[in-house]
Image: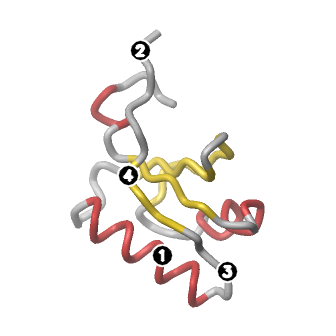
Amino acid sequence: MTGDALLETFALIISSSDGVHVQALLVGHPAVRSAAKAPEGIRVGLRPDYPSSIEEAAADINRYLLEAGVAVDGVEPAPASPSP
């Protein structure tokens, strides 16, 4: 979590039984700014300057993980972070 409300809106939750592998793979995806384990799955911070919508980035990340052989159970927008 960055504390920046705009950046926090560019986030996804990825559900997979292989969270460690997902995190390692996401380092190489151009849309990904950060990936961290969260209670609901892997919280993926997206680069706000990535040249596509959040939906297109989510689809591309899902495809990227599937092509790498990782079973993905779900990809969805992350809920807003609670305010401090």
- Picture coordinates of residue 8, whole percent (x, y): 38, 36
Residue at 51%, 69% (x, y): give it. 29
The numbered disc on residue 70 is 3
Q: Please, what is the three-letter code of the amino acid marked with disc 4?
A: Pro
Q: Which residue is mark 4?
A: 77
Q: Which residue is mark 1?
A: 62
- Picture coordinates of residue 39, whole percent (x, y): 66, 40
Quick one: label 1, few (<14), some, or many (20+) residues within 10 Å?
Answer: some
Looking at marks 2 and 3 on the same chain, the residue that comes earlier in the sequence is marked by: 3
- Picture coordinates of residue 83, whole percent (x, y): 41, 14
Using the numbered discs, state the Cα–Cα distance from disc 1 to disc 4 in whole angstroms: 13 Å
Quick one: label 3, few (<14), some, or many (20+) residues within 10 Å?
Answer: some
Looking at marks 2 and 1 on the same chain, the residue that comes earlier in the sequence is marked by: 1
Using the numbered discs, state the Cα–Cα distance from disc 2 to disc 3 in whole angstroms: 33 Å
Q: Please, what is the three-letter code of the amino acid marked with disc 2?
A: Ser
Q: Secondary structure at mark 4?
A: strand
Using the numbered discs, state the Cα–Cα distance from disc 3 to disc 4 in whole angstroms: 19 Å
Q: How is the image coloured?
A: secondary structure
Q: Secondary structure at mark 2?
A: loop
Using the numbered discs, state the Cα–Cα distance from disc 2 to disc 1 in whole angstroms: 29 Å
Q: Image height check: is 64 above or below 9?
A: below
Looking at marks 2 and 4 on the same chain, the residue that comes earlier in the sequence is marked by: 4
Q: Nearer the viewer, residue 31 or 66?
A: 66
Q: Which residue is mark 2?
A: 83
Left or right of 76 in this view: 74: right
The answer to the question of whether label 1 and label 3 lie on touching residues, with beta carbons closer than 8 A, is no
The answer to the question of whether label 3 and label 4 lie on touching residues, with beta carbons closer than 8 A, is no
Quick one: label 4, few (<14), some, or many (20+) residues within 10 Å?
Answer: some
Q: Image height check: is 55 above or below 2?
A: below
